Amino acid sequence: MSIYAELLEEALVYERSAVAAGDLAGSVVEKEVHGRRYLYWQLRMGDRSVQRYIGSDSPALRADLERRSQRRGDLASDQEALARLAAMLLAAGLPREEVRVSAALRLLADLGLFRRGGVLVGTQAYRAYGPLLGHRLPAASLRTQDIDVALELSVAIAAAEEPAPALASELHGLGFLPIPGLDPSQPSTSFKIRGRELRVDFLTPATGRARERPVIVPGIGLAAWPLPLLDYLIEEPTPAVILASKPILVRLPRPARFALHKLWTAARRSVAEAAKSGKDRLQAAALIEILAADRPDDLVADWRALGRRSPRAQGRVARELARIPEDQRRAWPRPLRAIRRSAGSRV
């Protein structure tokens, strides 16, 4: 856990320093966008000023920027240090992400997708929780050729100030082929790597009436498919590292929200998707067991946040929680037993 924590910290510093690499003569400026504060790196290019999006304002971010300004080592040596830390974790037996998946994730990270509000969800996110939480997750060996990325609109809008390429065009140029939807006149929200089964799907929270057609995400140049309750899942994401020969910094949902959202997803699936429902419940139960022991307050807080966001969704999750065996729930700390009792009262 100590090595992983060091790897994560260094990966965050590296990401922020890479944004400003070669631009140390500039300065950090802050802006307020939709009630949230963001930091940008401002520099002169010819006769104009250019701003590059860094991230949401926080004491940790400001400390990292100050730390980087005092360091003069080049980025190559930083990359070598990250690779060494990742190699130590892999040598200790932590799971390595499959080569084709890690290559695709690295490409998305290099294009700035996760820095611009992208949040990794689905099975790839579940696999990344093990090192983050310091546990070996059951069924972490589950493999899938699908990568699901949710795009957080508020961060994407803030990042729109940075002059960035249209990522859809960039992906196409790098071998990602758009998969046509049912309506060929609408932009694609899914891409497939040429000659491989690997697929990348882009999602975004459903707002208002935008529920049955792709949404263009500002500042990113990608279309994403709107899904209900996705805003709850990806609110306040946490950074994490995908372990590969070259570690990849991504953003994940809060583990408790991921688990509760998985139960909600399982409850909504049709009979034809029974196998997927079982996988959803398996992943949720594994995370809940870990969080119940290590971070019970997170579960309580995110359970309450779910009720505030959608009482109906909380009711569905409650029915799924009620299916957890009696012997397993006895091991829950007192706050979680209270959640379990409230779940039982909804059935």
Image (tube, rainbow, N blue to C red):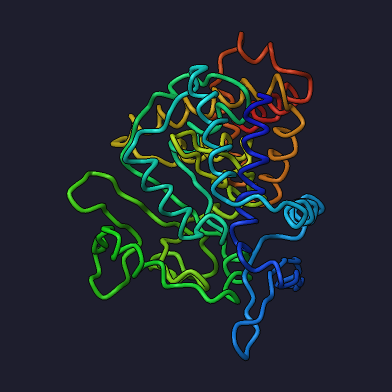
How many marks are shown on the rendered structure?
0
- Which of these two is toward me, 154 or 76? 76
Rendered position, 81 above or below 187? above
Q: Position of residue 254 (x, y in %)?
A: 63, 41
Q: Which quadrant does the C terminus fall into?
A: top right
Q: Which quadrant does the N terminus fall into?
A: top right
**Residue drawn where x is 51% and y is 55% of the image:** 228
Rendered position, 51 above or below 212? below
Q: Position of residue 78 (x, y in %)?
A: 59, 44
Work out which residue is located at the far bottom of the displayed protein and give it.
47
**Residue drawn where x is 21% and y is 45% of the image:** 196
**Residue drawn where x is 67% and y is 29% of the image:** 345
Q: Is residue 203 left or right of residue 89?
A: left
- Which of these two is toward me, 321 or 331? 331
- Which of these two is toward me, 145 or 259? 145
- Which of these two is toward me, 68 or 127? 68
Q: Position of residue 265 (x, y in %)?
A: 47, 40
Work out which residue is located at the far top of the displayed protein and give it.
327
Q: Position of residue 98 (x, y in %)?
A: 35, 33
Rendered position, 28 above or below 296? below
**Residue drawn where x is 45% and y is 32% of the image:** 280
Q: Is residue 197 left or right of residue 92?
A: left
Rendered position, 324 above or below 70? above
